[in-house]
Each structure stands twice: as C-alpha cells, then as structure tokens.
Amino acid sequence: MEPLIAVLVILIVFLVVFAVMGMKLVPQAETMVIERLGRYHRTLESGLHVIWPVIDKPRSINWRYLVTAPDGRTLFTHRTTTRIDLRETVYDFPKQNVITRDNVAIGINAVVYFQITEPKRSVYEIANLPDAIEKLTQTTLRNIIGELDLDQTLVSRDTINKKLGVILDEATHKWGVKVNRVELQDIQPPADIQQAMEKQMRAERDRRAIILEAEGNKQSQILYAEGVRQADINKAEGEKQAAILRAEGEAEAMVRIAQAEAASIAQVSGALVSQNADPTAYLIAMRYIETLKSMTTGDQARTVYMPYEATGILGAMGTMKDLFGGAGGAAGKPLS
C-alpha cells in the first residue's frame, strides 16, 4: 500500500505541476506567441489559457533599444520577454546628424508612435523590431532632409512628419506594425548658422519696421493731401456760390436801376412832350453832362476836347433849363 500511495502522490504532484506549467495568464492589451515543437502554433489573447507544457512553449523575444543616458550618452539596452504589448508605443530616438540640400549639417531627434497589429509578423518577419524601426526612420529622415534646404527644413515640420509617417507605415506594414505618426522634436543648426539666422531675423524686423513707418508716412501724406484738396474744393464751391449770389444781386440791382431810369425817362419824356420839346435831345445832353463830370474829376487837371455837336446840345440844355425854370415857378406843380 505504501508504494502505491507514494506513486499516487507523485502522480498527483506531477499533474499539478504539469497543469500549473500549462496555465498561461495573459494581461489585457498583451498577447503571447506559442510555438509547438519549434513551429508557430497559435497566438494567445488576453485571459487565462492552457497549453501543453514541454510541447508548447512561448516564443521568447529579445529586442534591443537605443536610449539616451542622463549625461547625454547613447546606450544600448536589451529586453527579453514572452509577451508582446499591443498598446501604442512611443520610441524616442537619439539625436542624429543629417545634411540638407545646401550642405548644412543639422541635428534632429524624432519620436515615432507605432502599434503592433499582427504579433506573428512582428516576431517572425523581423529579427529586432525596435532597432529596425529606428534604422528605417533614420535613413528615411536623411533622404527627406537631403531634398530640402535649411530654410525649408525649419518651416516644413508638418510636411516632413506626414511624409515620414507615410513612408514608415508602408515599410513596416509587412512587419505587422502600424506607424500612427512621427514627430520631429528638435532641429538644431550649427552655432554659426544660428548666429547668421538671428542677424537675418533682426535685419528682417528692422526692414519691416522701416517699411511700416514709410507706409504710415505715405498714408498720412495722402490723407493730408486729400484734406487740402477737399478744403480747396469747399473753398472754390463757396467762392462760386458767393460769385453767383453777387452776380444775381448785381443783375437784380441793374434791373431795378434800369426800371427806375425807365420810369424817370418816361416821366421826363411825358413832361417834354407836353411842352412840345424833343426828349431825345434831353437824354443825349444828360449823358454828355455825366460823361464830362467823370472826365473832369481827379487830382490832375485835364484838357477835354468837346465835339462840335456838343454846342448844339448844350444850347438845347439851356432852352430846357429855361423851360423847366418857368414851369417850376408856376405854383410848383408837378409834371404830368
């Protein structure tokens, strides 16, 4: 009985150990590649699984990473695991030197966000996935930067990121990897190039300031000229209106003067006709007298030559004087 009991105990212990060795617990967002007798058998999803010990074995994965130490040195680190992380992974590459199309050496460090979508391919299609992604990123980045000038490189980060992401995604597809995005963390030109760029930036700012000041002066002069022009226009309009009003006033005054003269002439003509006198001779004599008055006024003495016909007119004026004198002495009656 005792040997039988011992055999049963050993068998039970063996079964327990065998069952424990066959139980595999895979955490969430991780997976495990199982090989049976050295060949791919299946991929374990998250959860509890049972495999055949000795016959089935998880595939061991040895990945090498290039990391930057706190003192700035780049170091290689190895990680051996049997589980594959399906979450998005951030791989920060150390700074590398690349040469632009205009032969300027600059330092660039990039960050790649990738995710394993097919664990089988990531294990069997490539020997060292992180190292392969790093080398592919570096060579692709050199090719892209080599097609750009320094100025284009500094202002085309989004373009470089998108182009680099598309190329990496297409190249890593057969490895079962999805490259979600690539970001350039920093672009460092040489010190002398940075100084030249700073001088250029200051010169450009000074140029813009001068241009803005000139534009302001130009605009102010334009506004001043427009103001002067508008003032001249308003002044001319005012003078025009004043001249029109003066002309209208003078015309109205002349009309009224003419009307008064016409009334007076009509009254005088009526009086002369009633006395059997010639009104025409009277009017001509009056015009002569007014003209002589204007010709003889002034500071200097003038010699006035009277036409021969004026004597007859003056004689007619004397007759009219006697005529109107006799009429005026007759009880001061008004002319009708």
Image: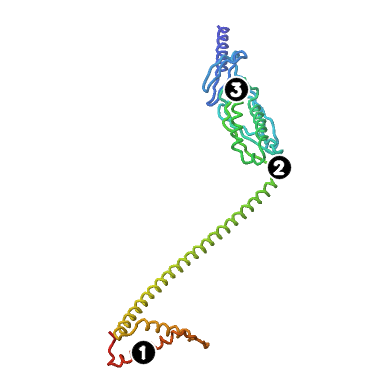
Q: Is residue 133 visible from the viewing direction of this image?
A: yes
Tag 3 secondary structure: helix
Locate residue 14, reporting x and y percent: 57, 13
Name the quadrant of the N terminus.
Answer: top right
Locate residue 6, reporting x and y percent: 57, 10
Q: Amino acid at mark 2?
A: Pro
- Between circles 1 and 2, the one closer to the viewer is 1
Circle 2 packing at 10 Å, graded few (<14), some (14-19), many (20+), is few
Q: Amino acid at mark 1?
A: Thr
Q: Quadrant of residue 130?
A: top right
Q: Is residue 298 above or below residue 5?
A: below
Sequence-earlier tag: 1 or 2:
2
Front-most of residues 118 and 2: 118
Front-most of residues 139 and 24: 139
Circle 3 residue: 174
Circle 1 residue: 319
Locate residue 209, reporting x and y percent: 61, 54
Name the quadrant of the C terminus.
Answer: bottom left
Locate residue 125, reporting x and y percent: 62, 20
Q: Residue at x 40, y 82 (%)?
A: 284
Sequence-earlier tag: 1 or 3:
3
Q: Amino acid at mark 3?
A: Lys
